[in-house]
Image: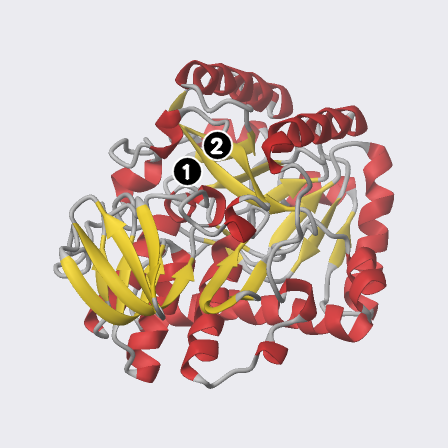
Amino acid sequence: MSWYDATMYDAGRPAGSLWEETAPALADGADLGPNGDDACDIAIIGGGFTGLSCALHLARDFGVDVRLVEAGPLGWGASGRNGGFCVLQPTGLSYERMISRYGEAEAKRFVASQVEATRFVRAFAEDEKIDVRPQGEGELHVAHAPSRYAGLVHECEVLNRTFGIAARLIPREEVAAEWYDSSEQFGALHIPVGFGLHPLRFARGLAAVAARSGARLHGRSPVIRWEKEGRLHRLVTPTGTIRASRVVVATNGFTRPPAPAALAENVIPVLSNIVVTRPLTDGELAAQNWRTETPCANTRNLLFYYRLLPDRRFLFGARGDLTGRPKDGLRMRRFMERRLGEVFPGWAHVETTHSWRGFVCMAARLTPSIGALPDDGSVFFALGYHGNGVAAAPWAGRLLAQLIGGKAEFSDIPALVRGAPARIPFPSLRRWYLRGALGYYRLMDI
């Protein structure tokens, strides 16, 4: 069960995002709708980046008979709601904590895998002619207060010295002159990895390629019961069943029963909200000296993330409320509109045209989880991207396909992300753990 309002799980409700309005329709044959009664080698639960990538690579690279089920339309979850930041890194750990916990060699292997993940997304979109509207080069981490610049100096040193990433510090004056200025801009760190994209265009493109490759994809087919019949799994939907020898769980922040308790009880869904403005005029862009298409995120623990879109709309994101109720969504929209005007005073008068929200998936160890259940090796999973899954999720889906197809071993999974999520004591208290953590982070951001 979940403490969030039932509307957050209502797969019949559109997200209300700009992406839904501006993405092409799913290709013919990409979404087969309710599944009827069927059998296959591999069943995948979740029709976002992870599941679609896994289905594609299983069908195309290994000739596996695969079925995918998704509660809503394909890409309905986080894959169609995020800010489109295809960047590093899907973890809440600092680089130092990665090294201290897992060792320098494993930290380097993980970071290298995520650099490759961003390149994989770009190359795949180009090769398959998916118009994801790529923008910018890398990501800009912006000090939201003068005291936070020192942390960027240290991060720059670690990225260059330990991980071989040519990050560059940019003083406040240069950011103001060449990138943009705002009331919460006190210098920045440019990390030359990744770019911005249109996430739902990418998700629907993945679905089209997966369907052409032989994967059978069923949107609007929520799994309401999961049973085991000998060595076979039986997934029951409102309109049919699928029997499979192996199952992949790729539901990220929407993971809940009937998914196994080892997954459903050990992740924490966290709401993230986005507002988008109308297109900005030349004068309005000049008011903040906005000159970049590079995605930006600030140094707050409860961060703001933002980018200028191709049609000159401005996307502004932040963490959300603790209930998911529609009235709290409206309250968050008003809060974000106010904060947008405070951070970018030249745009305080600019109205927003879209507002939506979805789940970020957190876990106790602050890293994604990829692997198979220790007590049932026929159940695979990849989830827990900590708000940065646009690159990590397609990479993880491909890695799962390679594991299932025999091309990779579990030792090929970087140690940071290998295995099931760490156990959360008394999972019924997760809402209160989250409330306490958010309160602490707000104090630290003052």
Q: Residue furthest front?
A: 230
Distance of label 2 from label 1 (alpha carbons): 37 Å
Instruction: Identify the residue position indicated by label 1 in the image.
Output: 312
Who is closer to the viewer here, 92 or 292? Answer: 92
Q: Is residue 314 visible?
A: yes
Quarter holding the C terminus? top right
User: Residue 399: where, in percent of width, then height?
Assistant: 49, 73
Q: Residue furthest bottom?
A: 407
Q: Assign a secondary structure to mark 2.
A: loop
Task: Classify 186 as above or below 130.
Answer: above
Question: Splitting the image into 4 quarters, where does residue 192 fall?
Answer: bottom right
Who is closer to the viewer here, 23 or 44? Answer: 44
Task: Classify 155 as above or below 328.
Answer: below
User: Residue 442: where, in percent of width, then height?
Assistant: 73, 25
Q: Nearer the viewer, mark 2 or mark 1?
A: 2
- Residue type at numbered disc 1: Arg
Which of disc 1 and disc 2 is earlier in sequence? 2
Task: Classify 104 as above or below 369.
Answer: below
Who is closer to the viewer here, 380 or 21? Answer: 380
- Specify the label residue 357 is tagged with: none
Instruction: Identify the residue position indicated by label 2 in the image.
Output: 2
Q: Residues within 10 Å of mark 2 (few under 14, many from 20)?
A: some
Q: Residue at x 25, y 64 (%)?
A: 243
Q: Residue at x 35, y 34 (%)?
A: 17
User: Residue 190: where, in percent of width, then height?
Assistant: 68, 54
Q: Is residue 373 left or right of residue 17?
A: right
User: Residue 338: where, in percent of width, then height?
Assistant: 56, 16
Q: Residues within 10 Å of mark 1 (few under 14, many from 20)?
A: some
Q: Residue at x 42, y 29 (%)?
A: 281
Q: Residue at x 34, y 55 (%)?
A: 227
- Residue type at numbered disc 2: Ser
